[in-house]
Amino acid sequence: MKRNHVLSWDQYFMSVAHLSAMRSKDPNTQVGACIVNEQKRIVGLGYNGFPMGCDDDMYSWERSGEFLDTKYPYVVHAELNAILNSIQNLSGCTLYVSLFPCNECAKAIIQSGIRKVVYEDDKYNGEPANLASKRMFTDANVEFVQLSYSLKVTVKQNNH
């Protein structure tokens, strides 16, 4: 007899996004993204971090202060990393992301051909960048769906 209580596709792919977020070295916000094609195959993964070649010990992770002394001009968001790391054309794909995309990521999502965004947290709901994302998604016919639950992924490491 088969097991009945298995993860749904949404739970599975959002869990992969959360697992990817565990690679982020950001001390405050860890975001993960997972892009899935129409055949339910993962075609891109990403998390928020500095660009390749930019030493994360030499750049600031601060959230306040002079702009160039914060993380904001340097960090690549999870969604953009997933798009840049993708292994195929993204037309018709679905993006699973743990935090609703900012307006900059929304532009890249739309331009890449992704048709659906499934997200968990919308902590910036109502802020200008968030409203801009939702407006662009609506106008570009990119469906966005918030999960009605949140997931937690735990990885236990054995130190042998």
Image (tube, helix red, strand yellow):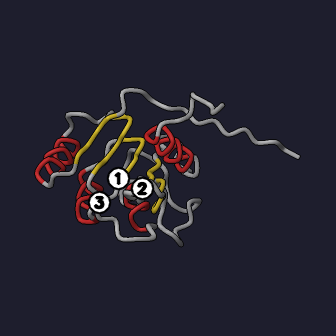
3 or 2: tag closer to the N-terminus? 2
Q: Quadrant where the N terminus lies?
A: top right
Number of residues whose C-alpha sits closer than 10 Å to that of mark 1, classed few (under 14), some (14–19) or many (20 or more): many
Residue 14 position, x and y percent, is 46, 42
- Residue 144 shown left or right of residue 63 in the figure: left
The residues tagged by marks 3 and 2 sit, at their Cα atoms, a distance apart of: 9 Å
The residues tagged by marks 1 and 3 sit, at their Cα atoms, a distance apart of: 7 Å
Whether residue 69 is visible to the viewer of this picture, yes or no, is: no
Question: SS at mark 1?
Answer: strand
Residue 15 position, x and y percent, is 52, 41
Residue 122 position, x and y percent, is 32, 35
Which image quadrant is residue 157 in? top right
Res 36 label: 2
Residue underneath mark 3: 92
Residue plotted at (30% across, 56% down): 105
1 or 2: tag closer to the N-terminus? 2
Residue underneath mark 1: 94
Q: Nearer the viewer, residue 69 or 32?
A: 32
Give the answer, above or below, for where 83 lies relative to 127: below
Give the amino acid type for the residue marked by disc 1 in the picture.
Answer: Thr
- Residue 82 shown left or right of residue 23 in the figure: left
CB atoms at circles 3 and 2 under 8 Å apart?
Answer: no
Give the amino acid type for the residue marked by disc 3 in the picture.
Answer: Gly
